[in-house]
Amino acid sequence: MKSRLLFAKFSEKEKPVELQITQEGEAKTVYIADDEVFIRKVIEANAEKGYELLFKRYYRPLCSHAVRFLYSKELAEDIVSEIFCTFWQKKTYLQIQTSYRAYLFTSVRHQAYAYLQSEFGRLQNTDIEQVKAATTLPNPQQILQYNELYLKMEEVIRAISPQSQKVFMMSRFEGKKNPIIAEELQISVKTVEGHITKALSILRKTLQDGFISIFLFMTSNMWFF
Amino acid sequence: MEFEIAKNIVFSSFEGKATPMQQKMVEEWLAKSENTELYFKWLEEWERETPQFLPDIEKAYQGFLSKTALITEESKPTVEKQISSKRSFINAFWFRFAASVVLFAGLGLWFFQDKIQFEEHTTSFGEVKNITLSDGSTVILNANSSLKVPRFGFGKSTREVFLQGEAEFAVKHTIDNQNFLVKTPDALVVEVLGTEFLVYARKRGTKVALHKGKVQLHSIKDKQEKVLQMKAGEVVTMDKKGNLKLQAEKNIAVAKAWQEHQFIFDHTSLQEIAYKIEENFGVRVQIADTTLAQREITGTYQAQNVEELLNALEEMLNVQIIKQNGEISIYEND
């Protein structure tokens, strides 16, 4: 088996996690090296050192994932940093049953969603506290809904006019101030504001009407699954 | 192999490229809770392969340390000051060592102060460079020129650059109305707020051409400051004594043309062209006799290098151009 060979060299030292993939009725065993074992060991020996490794390993991919929902570098970094802080301060990293990775990615998704809800959604309060305490793995529907959400964001942003898109990205993704955008693109500040308002209203409309309502229905049903 | 297939399919579902059937397959696959871990492993892999931006990890980690107050424990200097004779000997050694380091560093600083203080952009013959300064202003530096920009303090209270040669400036207006100064070797200071202009500062003299906005010129040669206000479309030349002479630019395009490797001649003498060639391409040009040197040319020529330009001139003027030992001589055709 090719995949068994592929992972054999990783799993020599540590006991591999055994996974079953069942397809076409036939069961096969695939070994996946638990590559977090090292970080976990370091955390046991020296929590601070280990946590540094954890932080540096996942910071970038988590930010990259967060920004797919938020379209703002600053917001993405804020959310990821915040997650790492709470994870540390509440010592959640000692309690979780899942991998750090699954926990962190799930948290990013929850937090990003909570942010979008507060910005675009109709719901007043979000269950951020509840979300932070989520130490179990999300269910398949939830996972795929999040997938759909960031793809939807991308679709909406691709669909707006090129000029609006440009202004929106400079403003939100890069975090530039309106007068600076106006100067760079040689347009008036009013026009800049117009483009941003337009982009945001399209986003709001799509997210509210087409997506969030269904999504909320699902999550409210599945939350304590 | 199912394992490989599943990975491809999951990746295409990340990208939004999976078909509805494949989506269904991923959903079924995820129903087995062990696969959720694998899903996130692949999600991480995918984010590493196609990052949306690259934040500064080190900076973020420092932010994390200060937020969680870990920093107080980690970087607290270990305080153990027990003075023993052995220690003081070591200290004396380290003191001497440190002192010599400081001395050498000081000497180095003194020798290289120009290099440390300024970032220098230079162009060789025939090269044109686009430079963006930290305040967003742009400079197009023409051939055989140099622009020095202070490394420290540029844009703090004033913006000041030093030019030798020829450059076109597009200065950004700052919110706090900071002025922008261009200083040339012969003590001319061009003062602007935000505009587009060209400065020519070579051995033959200094010239400023203004495309847009307003600038103020200060000639500070001989400690007698002469000030002149320029308007768009004007050209000011400065003579060796520091006197400023104002003239309306006939064709502002002439000044800008070299950016596109274009040569625009408007009743331009062959002597003038020879100077231009020397300045832009670094080859000396000699003209056989004075009547030939005074012949005038009008027209626009596209030339990437000196050869192309010379070929055009040869044909147009019906002259003979000979290149020898890196020198060019122009003769009348007999």
Image (spheres, coloured by chain):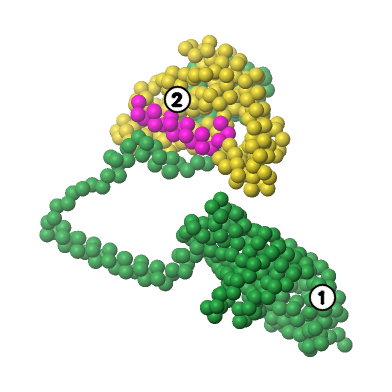
Looking at the image, can residue B186 be seen?
yes
> Pointer 1 indicates a residue of which chain?
B
Q: Residue at x 72, y 75 (%)?
A: B277
Residues packed near mark 1 inside 10 Å, few (<14), some (14 to 19) or many (20 plus): few
Residues packed near mark 2 inside 10 Å, few (<14), some (14 to 19) or many (20 plus): many
Residue A59 belongs to magenta span: no
Kindly indicate the quadrant of the structure image that contains residue A69: top right
Kindly indicate the quadrant of the structure image that contains residue B168: bottom right
**Vertical comparison of B213 with A195: above or below:** below
Q: Are marks 2 and 1 in contact (CB under 8 Å)?
A: no
Q: Residue at x 43, y 29 (%)?
A: A83
Q: Give percent across and percent down for residue B306.
A: 74, 72
* Residue labelled with disc 2: A103
Q: Give percent across and percent down for residue A65.
A: 54, 32
> Pointer 2 indicates a residue of which chain?
A
* Residue labelled with disc 1: B267
Residue A74 belongs to magenta span: yes
Q: Which residues are magenta?
A: A70-90
Q: Give percent across and percent down for residue B67.
A: 37, 36
Nearer-the-camera pick, B284 or B44:
B284
Look at the magenta stretch and give its main secondary structure: helix
Q: Name chain B's colour.
A: green
Chain that is yellow in the image: A
Looking at the image, can residue B259 be seen?
no
**Horizontal placement of B129 versus A18: left or right?**
right
